[in-house]
Image (spheres, rainbow, N blue to C red):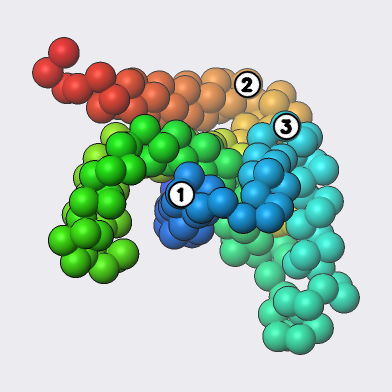
Amino acid sequence: MNWHPLLLSFQVAGVATVIVLVVGLGLALLLARKEFWGKQVVETVVTLPLVLPPTVVGFYLLFVLGRGSPLQEWLGVDILFTWMAAVVASATVALPLMVRTSKAAIESIDPDLEKAARTLGAPEWRVFRDVTLPLAARGIVAGLVLAFARALGEFGATLMVAGNIPGRTQTVPMAIYDLVEGNRLGEANAQVLLMTVIAFGMLWGVNRWQRGWWR
């Protein structure tokens, strides 16, 4: 069994999850606690990758990362058909899961608890660290795990911007596709079973975390 696609999948999903954690948590906090013009538009745009076909998301990413884009023209950065392009695609499709789950967790916190901390003189970063984060931890962790699982299984958008290059950008979903196309069903079954076990384990862990390990 070729282990490179699995290792690359974990590498891509891991880096994408770090990006999703930073960006997603910031967006969740903003959407849960602030009112501003265009809030519904921002929330809708963030959620779009959940409902758009992955190939459509990948097509948009081609404009963001490809020839003529600000990333390439202004910064001289060209990451198309590299594993970093796969990271961008995975983070894009996983971000809504993190934002929506974390936002719901933050909104469930009594705002009076945060106000009490501010009244006692705590700056905003202390309020977030000592009050908001601990109380919303279960929802945030759940969103993070779901985002990692989504990034691990990403196929369509990744294919558009990173391709399916063995040894360079071929993740497990890409490898399974190639194995089925080549009628190597035995190897495909092994890869499918492995991904199923990993996904089941993560979802089971999230459910236990949310309900409490002791239950």
**Viewer-side label of 2, 3:** 3
The tag on residue 51 is 3
Seen at 65% across and 49% down, the residue is 39
- Quarter that holds the C terminus: top left
Seen at 58% across and 57% down, the residue is 87
**Do residues under tags 3 and 1 come within 8 Å of each other at their CB atoms?**
no
Between residues 158 and 8, which one lies in front from this camera angle? 158
Seen at 41% across and 37% down, the residue is 107
Which residue is outermost to the right? 68
Residue type of the residue flagged with mark 3: Val
Q: Position of residue 189 (x, y in %)?
A: 55, 21
Q: Position of residue 78 (x, y in %)?
A: 72, 75
- Mark 2 lies on residue: 185
Determine which quarter of the picture holds residue 64. bottom right
The tag on residue 139 is none
- Evaluate whether residue 135 shows in this view: yes
Vertical position of residue 83 compared to residue 154: above or below: below
- Measure how far apart labels 3 and 1 are at the Cα level: 25 Å
Q: Is residue 132 left or right of residue 155?
A: left
Q: Is residue 173 left or right of residue 100?
A: right
The tag earlier along the polypeptide, 3 or 1, is 1
Residue type of the residue flagged with mark 1: Arg
Q: Secondary structure at mark 3?
A: helix
Between residues 25 and 14, which one lies in front from this camera angle? 25
Vertical position of residue 116 compared to residue 112: above or below: below
The tag earlier along the polypeptide, 2 or 3, is 3
Residue type of the residue flagged with mark 2: Leu
Q: Secondary structure at mark 1?
A: helix
- Mark 1 lies on residue: 33
**Viewer-side label of 2, 1:** 1
- Measure how far apart labels 2 and 3 are at the Cα level: 31 Å
